Image (spheres, rainbow, N blue to C red):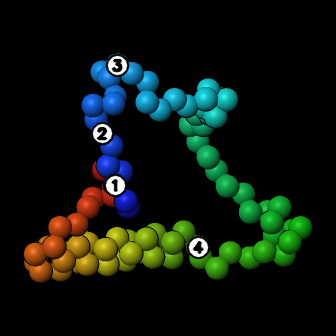
Amino acid sequence: MAQLNIDKSLIKFGQTVVKVDPAYYRPTEVDLLIGDPTKANTKLGWIPKYDLQMLVTDMVQSDLHLMRKEEYLKQGGFETLNYFE
């Protein structure tokens, strides 16, 4: 990710630098999301390739691979960024 070099003397304390249009806010937050693939199956003939157990296994394996890679880089003297915080 590229960093911008900004002359901080141009920004005054309390000055609005970035503003978000309220039209882009979510109207409500959903407490529970439950997917139902029935329509995709009946209308499109879509059949999922993964069941829940396979999905969780794949996600955990991916996280472990990332952790091993970051540890390897750190041992080699490289700094890694934590994208998950």
Instruction: Give the camera-side residue of 4 and 10.
Output: 10
Q: Sequence order check: which comes first, mark 4 or mark 3?
A: 3
- Give residue 14's mark: 3
- Which of the 4 quarters of the picture holds residue 68? bottom left
Read off the residue under disc 4.
Answer: 51
- Give residue 45's mark: none
Q: Sequence order check: which comes first, mark 4 or mark 1?
A: 1
Given contact means CB atoms under 8 Å apart, are the residues at marks 1 and 2 in contact?
no
Q: Sequence order check: which comes first, mark 1 or mark 3?
A: 1
- Which of the 4 quarters of the picture holds residue 46? bottom right
- Give residue 3's mark: 1
Q: Amino acid at mark 2?
A: Asp
Q: Secondary structure at mark 1?
A: loop
Residue 28 visible in the current orientation: no
Q: Is residue 32 left or right of residue 45?
A: left
Q: Residue at x 16, y 73 (%)?
A: 78
Q: Is residue 11 left or right of residue 25?
A: left
Quadrant of the rendering where the N terminus is positioned: bottom left
User: Which mark is in front, 4 or 3?
Assistant: 3
User: Which mark is in front, 4 or 1?
Assistant: 1
- Give residue 7's mark: 2
Distance between mark 4 and mark 3 Cα atoms: 50 Å
Q: Sequence order check: which comes first, mark 2 or mark 4?
A: 2
Q: Sequence order check: which comes first, mark 2 or mark 3?
A: 2
Instruction: Give the camera-side residue of 67 and 79.
Output: 79
Q: Residue at x 43, y 24 (%)?
A: 16
Q: Amino acid at mark 3?
A: Gly
Q: How many numbered circles are shown?
A: 4
Q: Residue at x 60, y 37 (%)?
A: 30
Q: Label 4 crowding class (10 Å Cα cut-off): few <14, some 14-19, many 20+?
A: few
Residue 9 visible in the current orientation: yes
